[in-house]
Amino acid sequence: MSAKRDRSSGVNKTSDRRKFLKGSLTVAAGIGLFDIVPRHVLGGPDHVPPSETFGAALIGVGGRGPGTFRDLSGKHKLNIRKIAECDVKFVGSADNKTRYTDFRRLLERKDLDIVAIATPPHWHALISIAAMDAGKDVLCEKPMTRFIAEGRAVIEAVKRTGQMFQIGTYGRFGSAGGGGPEIRKIIRAGFAKGHEVRVVKKGGFKVKQWSGPINVTPGDPPKNLDWDLYCGPSPLRPFHSPRFGGMHRGYWDYDGGGLGDMGQHYLDPISYRLGKDNTHPVKVEVSAPPAHPDVTGPWGWVKFTYADGVELILDSGEWGEPAGLQERSIGKNDLTAAQQAKLAEIPNEETMIGFGEAVKTRKQPGGNAEAAHYTSSIMHLANVAIRTGRTIQFDPKTERAIGDEEANRIIDQPMRAPWHI
Amino acid sequence: MPQVESAAKIWLDRIPNLEDGRRNPGLDPTVAAKLFDDILAEGEDAIVNVIDSLGESDNGKDWKTRLLLHGLLIHTGAKDREKGRERLELVYAKSLGDERADSAKTFVAMQLQWFATAKAVPALAAQLASKDIPLINAAAAALTAIGKPAVDSLRKAQANATGDAKIAIDHALKQI
């Protein structure tokens, strides 16, 4: 029943099919069969060969789901054949052919190459891992995870399976232009030390909008909803209607409030620009009232400090006094002549590729699991500080809070049976 | 006991009402710290009074109680408040053995998941014999969070467990 599967079987079967088709075409060309094989099979201008058509399914059809699925053929320009949809609210209408309730049944299909995941966030990591273990590439909606340890597990699944993973937010691609690469290069070279470098993101976190309603009378779940499966790895609660269908963002069981909703969008380009998509902050300070244990709530600001002194401030503007600190950038002119010379020697990074190209070339895309993990961890750390109400000292290597067991119990949470990472 | 309920009300009334009738408006941290200190200064009975004000179902009407009980553990999590935290853990764990609704015990077990140590293991392990699935799951999750000190008790409980309890215990041991 676990989302984890037998890792020795079922992996990369579809990739093998693609390799086989590619190899077959090479052999066909070599023995002069082009004359007798129709163009619609081999491809060419205006003809996409079958080997370039990808079977895809959508898991989580509400909210962003249809848009995420459309991105496969739109934004990512993949030739998609829609195989099926899966959702916990298909009870009574699922046929296990084109409509599934249980993603595990869907992932058994051999004609599936890609899954788009748009469930609530408490399912993102588990389904992503199960999909990759089943040999599927993954386009997963933000936020990538519900807590930090899940992110590490997704990265391990990518390494283990060789499948492609892309998070459904693309801010870093925009930041790759303009002054972004220069700041990134300066910070990654270690030249920010001794300088005041700070990014302040003010507002837009929808804190009140996604603060969970508290006094809700429980009722019976809709007949078409598998409530137990919806709760999944999170505690099985009485059915409170706001916990399902968008407002789930306001409950710690499923998401992280406005930070969970908007955080990864805002933080993806920032962490890229700051060159922090391969490390974590070492200190997180917070201004927030005591958090409720069940629902997300108000917070004022969160200040992150990285090991090199670079700072990031999230200022909600929706509670308390603002952090009151100004942005400070850094450019080539702030560096010594020796540093500038060293900087000129550092080669430019390769251009990031999108999910479509990643699927075809088998090279990880720009918003890959590792980059997405470090970005989503910023908002998770913010919520750890908000929930504990105190400064968190964090070890980027072990991904654990230093001397704070309570914080670590939010960073790595038990899951309800049978689910585990 | 009416006087017990009124004692808890003194604390609960110091928390502002919901915003728009639905959302936690946020208690000023300074006011909150004073409130938590006042409760702790009153001793074990005051904490038990608050626990006693938990509702008999998870319908949100006791949200102030939940905020208080959670706030106490957060407040005592600060480095210079270890003694308060130890006392809180003992009171929370002891309350699981009292006569109270499963929903209330489930909430207390969920709070222990945040901070409990080996000291709370016997009280949590005893909940694994409950018939209430959310309570079993909450106790199992708290024992999982405690980790190695909970293994012996989980194994002991595993021997006689059936159904959902067995699933939860097996799973807890697997996760530890």
Image: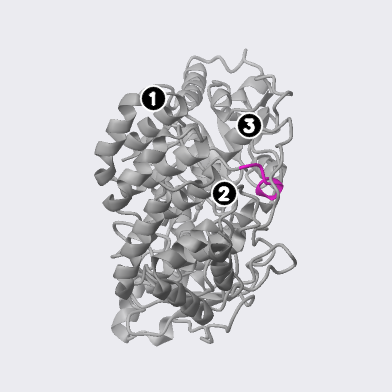
Expressed as whole percent of the image width and height from the top left, the position of residue A58 reads 64, 35
Mark 2 sits on what residue?
A: A254
| First of labels 2, 1 by sequence position | 1
Mark 1 sits on what residue?
A: A6
Measured Cα–Cα span from mark 2 to mark 1: 27 Å
Which residue type does callout 1 highlight? Asp
For the record, the magenta segment spans: A238-244
Label 2 and label 1 in one chain: yes
- The residue lying at 62 percent from left, 44 percent from top is A76
Expressed as whole percent of the image width and height from the top left, the position of residue A102 reads 59, 28
Where disc 1 sits, the SS reads loop
Which residue type does callout 2 highlight? Tyr
Residue A28 is a magenta residue: no
Where disc 3 sits, the SS reads strand
| First of labels 1, 3 by sequence position | 1
Where disc 2 sits, the SS reads loop
Mark 3 sits on what residue?
A: A57
